[in-house]
DNA sequence: TCAAAAGTGTTATATCTACACCCATGC
DNA sequence: GCATGGGTGTAGATATAACACTTTTGA
């Protein structure tokens, strides 16, 4: 009954087989992780009455080496033999930004043949959401020149064609990443096809300025996932400080979803995800606002 | 301005750098794909009046080699250098089951260090849903001994502990895979922890009989994803024949979700995903049922 | 005083749940 | 006739959307 006693066609036990196993027989791709580290900040606001606007930001690193020398890329690196993919991502996150991640999620694994000119590279992407007000995020004072870029994400064009047995829906999304000095842009084409019974989606980089590799595509994917997940999970709170006002929370929703929300409806919707405290904002130039914290007993149902 | 003219610290242009790039400097893991091929079949039913019950099935392959010789594993294989991950998955799907997939989705990439005793193997898992009544699925008559296993998925134990700043929720799920001769089982522990601001989930194989590698865990993950996606996408229709009754569709929902649904509510919910035809079932032992097809203009919104 | 935001209430409209009920068929 | 599934109607509860309105502050 012992599995170790089973012998294969060559008469080897499992132990013998493993001892004779030669990895080097097969050519292997390289595996990397890429990190999408999002945060939210306040923009400048000159009117003393108005609330500062929020902006979604993404951390990028200027490439100091070939390929894509001088362009901006997602932080990341190779997965070493002794660590899991998740550990590699955590290690990179820590070394690039000094953050012990509070939220990290595997997004998608990118493996097109030509995506890296050096060699065949398969990259596993992770999304991390951080609260910039609480964390000591080192970016900008790093040798690698890491910088936060303000992310905007807009529908540029849409096209729908109907067929007897389905349709094709094509969208062009414009991504802009605005840094202190540079403006990076990309246009991503997303084609949803329904033929017969089910939807298929293909994405492609149409145009790209200053963003290395296929990272524009990865960014687009991450934004979509973020927009999606914010609707039915509690991930937003990873972007928030421990105490926040409901207006601030609403602003974060709005900047991620890219649309305005009605305050009354919003408050009701998120009511049981938050708990009110006895504290209030001060010196706001208008009526003070109650501060809330995340309800750690929140449950989707 | 030409990027090719930029020189790095060693004074190389991008072209020169790429020519001198030596892949063999770094040790690399192997990359595989694993396919979760689900389908639905009718079970035997002796009462002429009753409808046959539906069962969810998963395709597994008996291992003819070490490691896990004699156990059952997900179909899959190594990703070759000249093909994308998706192409590798499609190729394997075609060769293992003779199916040109109508639906295929990347699930998750598994990369724990010890998950394959041969060497470091990172595996990208894909889920495929097939309509067994229409496809010529070769399984069982294959040299590799591929077989459909009936999948059941049950909550065995749950435990919730509340803390001041969060909670821990632990679930034990029992998976059973019933083949013609063999019964494979596994227990997966899923721990959701909320500490401070956001949920973290960890899964682990507690017990496993007859299922190779960490595939029990991958199967558990896939079932959860399937249960989730069936609620807000049109993926079910990949499991259905072109024409079906609403009761059949409901049965498929029920077998995937593992719970009974009210017919009236179900019909209203899926009303605009389907289109009625003029055809009816015959010889059913009860009132004939109208046949429906997928509404290829369906839209989530 | 007033601009801006904070916060509540109201009404109409969907959507979901649970259940009751009638219909059509093959044996 | 009757067991079984097919199919519809309805009342109550709950959620959503749109909008109007009141409150509170700092300058």
Image (cartoon, coloured by chain):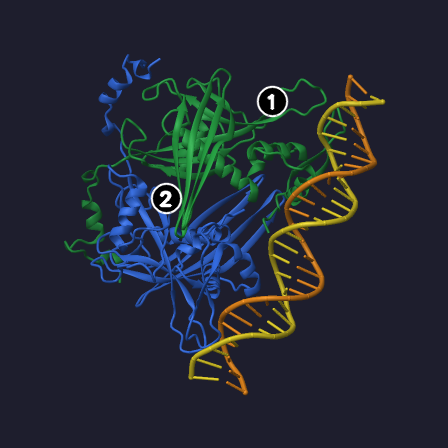
Chain colours: A blue, B green, C orange, D yellow
Q: Which residue is mark 1?
A: B43
Q: Quadrant of the N terminus of chain A?
A: top left
**Residue at image point 31% right, 58% down:** A135
Return the chain for callout 2.
A
Say whether residue B245 is visible.
no
Where residue A19 appears, as percent x and y from the top left, is 22, 21
Quote the CA–CA distance across marks 2 and 1: 39 Å
The residue positioned farthest toward the left in the image shown: B10
Where residue B214 appears, as percent x and y from the top left, is 37, 30
Q: Which residue is mark 2?
A: A110
* SS class, disc 1: loop
Say whether residue B289 is visible.
yes
Label 1 environment density (alpha carbons within 10 Å; few <14, some 14–19, many ≥20): few
Do the residues at discs 2 and 1 belong to one chain? no
A131 vs C19, nearest the viewer: C19
Where residue A147 appears, as percent x and y from the top left, is 29, 61
Q: How many marks?
A: 2
**Residue at image point 54% right, 55% down:** A159
């Amino acid at each position: 009954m012992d599995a170790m006693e089973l012998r294969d066609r060559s008469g080897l036990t499992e132990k013998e087989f493993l001892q004779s196993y030669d990895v080097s027989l097969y050519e292997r791709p390289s595996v990397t992780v890429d990190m999408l580290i999002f945060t939210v900040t306040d923009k400048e606001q000159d009117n003393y009455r108005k609330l500062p606007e929020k902006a979604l930001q993404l951390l990028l690193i200027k490439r100091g080496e070939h390929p894509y020398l001088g362009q901006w890329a997602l932080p990341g690196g190779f997965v070493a033999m002794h660590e899991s993919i998740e550990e590699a991502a955590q290690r990179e996150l820590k070394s690039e930004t000094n953050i012990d991640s509070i939220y990290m999620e595997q997004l998608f694994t990118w493996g097109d043949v030509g995506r890296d000119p050096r060699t065949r590279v398969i990259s596993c992407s992770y999304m991390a959401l951080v609260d910039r007000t609480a964390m000591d995020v080192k970016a900008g004072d790093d040798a690698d020149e890491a910088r936060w870029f303000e992310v905007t994400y807009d529908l540029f064009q849409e096209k729908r064609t109907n067929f007897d047995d389905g349709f094709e829906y094509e969208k062009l999304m414009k991504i802009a990443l605005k840094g202190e000095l540079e403006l990076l842009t990309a246009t991503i084409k997303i084609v949803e096809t329904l033929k017969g019974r089910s939807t298929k989606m293909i994405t492609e980089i149409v145009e790209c300025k200053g963003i290395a590799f296929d990272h524009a595509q990865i960014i687009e994917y991450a934004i979509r996932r973020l927009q999606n997940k914010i609707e039915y999970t509690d991930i937003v709170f990873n972007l928030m400080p421990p105490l926040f006002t409901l207006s601030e929370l609403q602003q974060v929703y709005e900047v991620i979803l890219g649309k305005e929300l009605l305050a009354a409806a919003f408050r009701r919707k998120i009511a049981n995800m938050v708990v009110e405290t006895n504290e209030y904002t001060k010196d706001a130039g208008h009526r003070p606002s109650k501060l809330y914290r995340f309800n750690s007993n929140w449950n989707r149902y």
